[in-house]
Image (cartoon, helix red, strand yellow):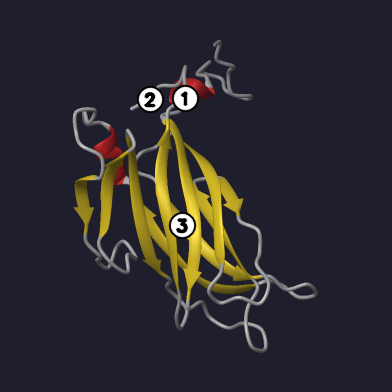
Amino acid sequence: MDCLPLSGSDDGQSLMDSLLGLLRVRVKRGINLAVRDVMSSDPYVVVKMGKQKLKTRFIRKDINPEWNEDLTLSVSDPDASIKLTVYDHDTFTKDDKMGDAEFNIKAFIEALKMDLEALPNDTVISKVQPCRSNCFAEESCVIWKDHKVIQDMCLRLRNVECGEVEIQLQWIDLPGCKGL
């Protein structure tokens, strides 16, 4: 596969040369999200990394929504942080913010660099403890499952009275890209 240069790139470097791979963020569900309408909220999630911004559909009148949606980010910088923000969809006014969380993927990326093929299914590769810098509501494990590295996270939302969001990370290798 030939790599196409980035438009406006004056150094001739192609997008595929700087791309490490794709990160699939499965936004599973929200738990006890804040009420922003009369009795409920119409929540959706926005995931940002660098200049990339993706969002889920909104779910009507539900403070415990189940999205189960996959959002795919292209990763060029393994040290970049990912910001997740929950909003309440409003038809006639600006959408209300319902909290945010931020996390990095360093432990996940480190696990991807290991030779894991000989490991049994469901092996815990590493654990990340909740701390002030990661928004985790509980311990997050990086796991080898079905020949893939996955990481489940429960993120406690900041700047809001309550709410958590559960997500899962999974890596997608792309042929022709730089890789890890």
Q: Secondary structure at mark 2?
A: loop
Identity, as a three-letter code, of the amino acid under mark 1: Leu
Residue 26 at x, y percent in the picture: 48, 51
N-terminal-most mark, 2 or 1: 1
Q: Is residue 176 above or below residue 113?
A: above
- The CA distance from mark 2 to mark 3 is 23 Å
Residue occupied by mark 1: 174
Tell me where residue 84 appears, x and y as whole percent. 48, 59
Residue 1 rendering spot, x and y as whole percentages: 54, 11
Q: Hey, what amino acid is under mark 2?
A: Gly
Regarding mark 1 in the picture, which secondary structure is present there? Answer: loop
**Is 166 in front, or is 87?**
166
Name which of mark 2 and mark 3 comes first in the sequence: 3
Image quadrant assignment for residue 18: top left
Q: Which residue is mark 3?
A: 83
Above or below, comparing residue 37 to residue 127 in the picture: below
Quadrant holding the C terminus: top left
Name the amino acid type tagged 3. Answer: Lys
Residue 34 locus on image (x, y percent): 53, 80
Q: Residue at x 42, y 28 (%)?
A: 173
Label 3: few (<14), some (14–19) or many (≥20) C-alpha neighbours in 10 Å: some
Q: Which residue is mark 2?
A: 179
* Residue 159 quadrant: bottom left
> For the view shown, which residue lies furthest in the bottom direction?
38
Q: Residue furthest top?
A: 2
Dot placed on the residue nearer the N-terminal end, 3 or 1: 3
- Residue 129 vertical position relative to residue 51 in the rendered view, above or below: below
Location of residue 166 (image quadrant): bottom left
Q: Are marks 2 and 1 in contact (CB under 8 Å)?
A: yes
Pointer 2 with pointer 3, Cβ within 8 A: no
